[in-house]
Image (cartoon, rainbow, N blue to C red):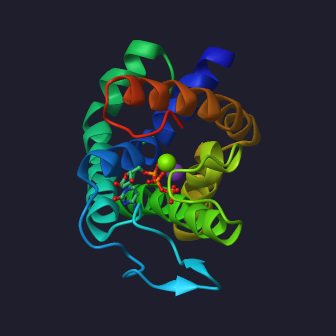
Amino acid sequence: MIGALVATAFWAMLPAYVPNNAAVLAGGGRPIDGGREWRGARLLGDGKTWRGTAVGTLVGVCLALGLNALADPASAAVGVDLPTFALPAAFALAFGAMCGDIGASFLKRRSGRERGAAFPGLDQLDFVVGALGLAFVVDTDWALAVFTPRVLAVVLVMTPVLHVVTNVAAYALGVKNEPW
Ligand code: CTP
Ligand code: K
Ligand code: MG
């Protein structure tokens, strides 16, 4: 029972998990805020770039389309009816994840945190709020069917754990500047 919930939660959130990691690898170039400041601090900071956002979104959408092709064999393998992603839902999960992370940077700058500073709690869940929020707006029926209260509960517990593990690993591999 819990295994089925975890499998569904992980599968359904993969298009939201991967974009931020892809952005870390692809980031650089022009910052979204163009260097602008607001109330004595950068609007977003140099860590939020057009390229990172675009590549992250694209990678998330492509991943969702790849999962669609694997949904039948994967469902058979784990014995769970895993969902597929229509293009609007795929886009909402990927772009929503990037937007949640961008919104978190806005809040970090407003609270005096420099680029790269940790904001425990926000760091682990900003992209979940963005991804699920946009998915529920863009494809409400799909989101309600996939993200039942129990799946949502698993997402909220599982995501921070996965986030910590992947970021510590990325830091250890020298891919990321901070382990959060
Ligand atoms: N990145 C990007 N565009 C994004 C998100 C991330 O280019 N929309 C890249 C940047 O190179 C960034 C790195 O991924 O430095 C790590 O992302 P993150 O930890 O979210 O950014 P920080 O540099 O820590 O900045 P902030 O304090 O604003 O979160
Ligand atoms: K972040
Ligand atoms: Mg960071």
**Residue in view at x 59 percent, y 50 percent:** 128
Residue 141 placement (x, y as % from top left): 59, 60
In the image, is residue 37 above or below residue 170? below
Q: Nearer the viewer, residue 172 or 15?
A: 172
The reply to whether residue 139 is in sight is: no
Q: Is residue 150 left or right of residue 90?
A: right
Q: Residue at x 56, y 29 (%)?
A: 164
Can residue 48 be seen by looking at this rendering?
yes
Give the x, y percent position of residue 119: 67, 49
Image position of 136 with respect to 169: above or below? below
Q: Position of residue 136 (x, y in %)?
A: 61, 62
Q: Is residue 61 found left or right of 177 in the rendered image?
A: left
Q: Quadrant of residue 32?
A: bottom left
Image spot of residue 70 (x, y percent): 28, 31
Does residue 112 lie above or below 145 as drawn?
below
Residue 167 horizontal side relative to residue 70, left or right: right
Q: How many marks?
A: 0
User: In front here: 75 or 94?
Assistant: 94
The quadrant the N terminus occupies is: top right
Q: Quadrant of ligand 1?
A: bottom left
Q: Quadrant of the C terminus?
A: top right
Give the answer, above or below, for where 64 lies relative to 175: below
Q: Residue at x 56, y 63 (%)?
A: 105
Left or right: residue 35 compared with residue 179: left
